Amino acid sequence: MHSSPSTPNTAFRRLRGDRSPGEFAAAVRRAGRDIGEQVSCDARYIGRVESGEIRCPNYAYERVFRHMFPGRDLADMGFEPRELVRGRRVPATAAPRPVPRPSPYETETDEESDVLRRAFMTGGPAAIATTLMLGPAAAAETVHKVGRPQARAVRAAVREIRLHDDRHGAGALYRQAGHSLGAAYRLLDEGTYSQAVAEDLMGGAGELAISVGWLAHDSGRLADARSFYGEALATARMAGDRALESHAFCNASFLARDAGRFREAVRAAQAAQQAARHLGSPRLLSLLALREAGGWAGLGDRPGCERALARAHTLFGRGPCAADPEWMTFYGEAELSGLEAQSWSALGDHHRAAEHARRAVGLQAPHFTRNAALYTAELANNLASARRVDEATDAGIRVLDLLGGVQSPRVRGMLSSAAQTLQPYSRRPDVAEFLRGQAQSRPA
């Protein structure tokens, strides 16, 4: 059912069960920590949801609720579609209660930002690009005064892209998202704005360049990805933004590893750690150590890889903190295990890699559909290389089940590698079934 301001959300109330609002709020906060989201949930927030005052949660709460209740969408939980809620102005009496550190996914109430976000929700990145360039009324032909709403809209585009990529992969997003990036840089090049807006706009444009670069990377367009990451790095250097610089180097290291440029992967990861040294985020430094480990593994340097992995685990163990970048919501225990699996695989230790990949699959939150498919494909690949045929076939079939909602050439490439390794066992019925399914799943 759908709730409204005058209709209690009985579906959500049923999900709470016998727990008190305070107990349920504590469970929401714990679930948020499990997937790297920081939500300031208390009994009052639960009451506002159940009364129908909150008709649709922001993105952080949506991810937490989907993690808590796998298989249920917003409608199943009694919420209205986000695009319908954003189509109305939020009354001042219903404005969210301020919290000390709001989630990066908190919904804006500014009318112009709502229009820009709604354009993305209904028409994708290309629609928000047009709105960014022409304004909400789409009446002007040139870029003019740029203010906070446009800067916030660039950030909104980044978050929407990440949310869609988490669920569906890069295949369906890449070309459209490039229009948003062009629009953001057009604002920078042709608009007029204050210094404060310039800093926010440059940071948003740089993060958008990284997001589009990642879509190119995951789609197998490695040369395009390198160009976008370079653009983000140049923007970071011009803005003196160390956080953006560390993010750009982080992704550049991952790309260099996938492209077989392992020495470059190590250097980029080390540059990222230098940029992030004073940002106060152990989790960020942990991820960057994993990027370095991947480079050392590609070089066949086992001691260098093991040192970087040990550093990554130590830093990860210090826990999350307020300084963690918002783009790192994907980085939890599952990603740590998944990236470690890739390092052991590159070193040829497929049994060890398979165990880490299996752990990653078991730890992955259900709403990160693309990563679930990725880790399972990694598992299948390493099991196949370790000649554990039954287990590899079973994992491969599970990936095929996930591919219906995921468009990631990277995942398909890993699955194809597993299929090639299993080809000598094609007379076995289960292997033959997997090989047929893998062949049929290839894009036309």
Image (cartoon, grey):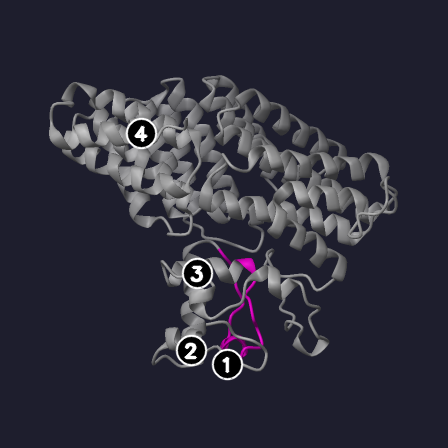
Q: Which residue type carries mark 1?
A: Pro
Q: CA distance from mark 3 to mark 4?
A: 29 Å
* Closer to the eye: label 3 or 4: 4
User: Given contact means CB atoms under 8 Å apart, are the residues at marks 4 and 1 in contact?
Assistant: no
Say which of 6 and 375 sits in front.
6
Residue 310 vs residue 286: left or right?
left
Residue at which label 4 appears: 440
Q: Which residue type carries mark 3?
A: Asp
User: Given contact means CB atoms under 8 Å apart, are the residues at marks 3 and 4 in contact?
Assistant: no
The numbered mark at residue 436 is none
The numbered mark at residue 13 is 2
Give the percent coordinates (x, y) of residue 177.
Answer: 62, 37
Residue at which label 1 appears: 8
Q: What element does badge 2 sit on?
A: helix
Above or below, 66 relative to 346: below
Say which of 142 and 47 sits in front.
142
Mark toward the start of the polypeptide (1 vs 3): 1
Q: What element does badge 1 sit on?
A: loop
Residue at 61% from the left image edge and 29% from the top image edge:
229
Q: Residues within 10 Å of mark 1 (few under 14, many from 20)?
A: many
Residue at 17% from the left image edge and 28% from the top image edge:
432
